[in-house]
Amino acid sequence: MNNEPRRSAQDMIEHLAPVLSLRRRIRAVTALMAGVAGAVFVSTLWWSEPGPLPGRTHLAFALFTALCLAWAAYGGWLLTRRVPLFAADRVIAAWIGLAASLATTAVVTVVAVRRGTGAGLALAVGGLFVAVAVVLVVRAHLRRAALLRRMRELTGRGNP
Amino acid sequence: MTDELLVVRAQLGERGALAELLARWRMPVWTYVRRMLDADRADDVSQEIWLAVVRGLPRLREPGRFVPWLFTIARRSVTDRLRDEYAQAEETSAFGDIAGEGIAEDPAEVMVERAALVSVLSALPVLEREILVLFYLEDLPVEVCAHVCQVPAGTVKSRLNRARRLLRESLEEKGHTS
């Protein structure tokens, strides 16, 4: 009967390395951000297009939007199911999310104003994204602070 | 350093703490898996469990409950492999789990059983095997076993009693004395 694992601890850590790699986390965050930002941007172009559009153009806009949403879904799935985001990663990801939300809102608003369709809707949608991003930033900082506080409590208990 | 502190540090993003946690719990997890499954699958399933642990660790809300959480994940992977055996065992044990029975606490007997346990474990039904591994080989308290197996503590005690009886019968058949 085999009473020892064949893989050493080092082997196991090496097998887990791809899951913990920085590149994979960046890829997941980028896919989510680019997908959401792209979907908002293309939808704004579509919505603010002057005059009636031919069927093919509608189809093209719809396909672009669907493609961006698919990337956003892929990024979201990676972040929630496949790639572990630890407290420090969460803080960084939340700030990237906030920056991307602000940038997307700015670009979409400028496009809407230049096309004369009014900035109201663009600002409303962008504001919603920014608000969600701010909530994520606050939550990430609170979670990290709570963990740091618990670590200090446990360290203090260990070294009286 | 306590498990809880290691978990908190790992959740903060310290790779060293994660590696230490893995080094500390690698063998207990492997032992549990190996006693439940054959040698060919034990390494792969252990790896799969650690993958799930690493992925789920940031979402663990109570770092102090790491061990029950870890063995719950391990049990899920094992039950996935032994789905048929578990389904059959749950059916037959439905009438056998009488809550509230006490556990005999003779330390000498426990030592004999612990030593002889491994040799006859594989012949026992899956629910009894599982509870013996968790309680005797992993030294988990009844409450933690109950959490891991998702049954009331009374059911754990009755399963333990039944498992001990089966174990004793197996040992007697093999010519051991308990």
Image: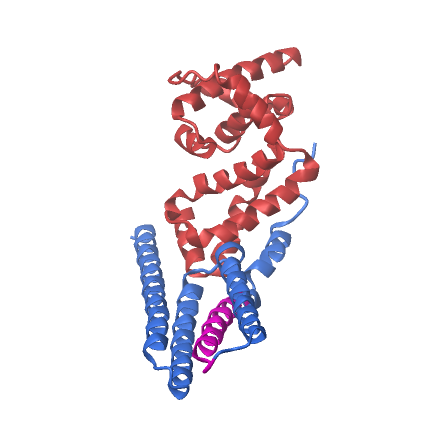
Looking at the image, residue A22 sits to the left or right of residue B123; the answer is left
Colour displayed for chain A in the image of the structure: blue
Compare residues B5 and A141 and report the one nearer the observer: A141
Splitting the image into 4 quarters, where does residue B81 fall? top right
For the record, the magenta segment spans A25-51
Splitting the image into 4 quarters, where does residue A98 fall? bottom left
Q: Is residue A58 magenta?
A: no
Could you tell me residue B9's position as x and y percent?
42, 57
Compare residues B111 and B117 and report the one nearer the observer: B117
Q: Is residue A32 magenta?
A: yes
Answer above or below: position of B166 versus B5.
Answer: above
Colour displayed for chain B in the image of the structure: red
Could you tell me residue B48's position as x and y percent?
59, 46
- Say whether residue B2 is visible: no
**Count of numbered circles on the image:** 0
Could you tell me residue A27's position as x and y percent?
55, 68
